[in-house]
Amino acid sequence: MTTIWVDADATPKAVREIICRAASRTETMAQFVANHHIPLPPSPFLSTIQVEAGFDVADNLIAQQAQPGDLVISQDIPLAAEVIEKGVAAINNRGETYTPENIRQRLNMRDFMDTLRSSGIQSGGPAPFSDKDKQTFANALDRWLARQRS
């Protein structure tokens, strides 16, 4: 059985709601991993794993537990890189798919931006989460779920 693993600490509520509806509708298990309580609607297909607070604790659990055929939803590029190496699909909260072809470039850009920030250069953050992002995410999740059924 495939599982959707959600790096839930920074997942927008709108994305969480989309995942909950889709998982329940398709009877796909969704595990929300976070270091705090994540409220979910009642469903046998939705569960939370609350981990202790700490750097990468949720990411490490997801990386250990995710199996080929599963989906990881995370903004964390190093986590995405790790699960892709295991044959696990990965998308971010805006519906962008991480692939073996694009993950190295994204890691390099992340490291470059981190270096800029640590040297005091203000790079700004990501754009606010929009309705278009929500729709793009919903479409990417639906495409992945449809591939699981075929």
Image: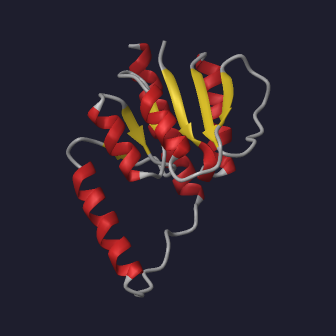
Q: Is residue 102 above or below residue 28?
A: below
Q: How many marks?
A: 0
Q: Is residue 6 above or below residue 148?
A: below
Q: Position of residue 19 (x, y in %)?
A: 61, 35
Q: Position of residue 123 (x, y in %)?
A: 42, 81
Left/right of residue 5 with respect to residue 14 in the rendered view: left
Q: Nearer the viewer, residue 4 or 81?
A: 81
Quarter where residue 121 is shown: bottom left
Q: Residue at x 42, y 18 (%)?
A: 148
Q: Residue at x 57, y 50 (%)?
A: 134
Left/right of residue 12 with respect to residue 147 in the rendered view: right
Q: Which quarter of the rendered picture does the C terminus lie within? A: top left
Q: Is residue 122 above or below residue 137?
A: below
Q: Nearer the viewer, residue 57 or 109?
A: 57
Q: Position of residue 21 (x, y in %)?
A: 67, 30
Q: Position of residue 146 (x, y in %)?
A: 44, 22
Quarter where residue 66 is shown: top left
Q: Is residue 31 above or below residue 100?
A: above
Colour convention of the picture = secondary structure
Q: Residue at x 31, y 36 (%)?
A: 84
Left/right of residue 128 with respect to residue 111 in the rendered view: right
Looking at the image, the residue that sits furthest to the left is: 101
Quarter where residue 108 is shown: bottom left
Q: Residue at x 57, y 19 (%)?
A: 28
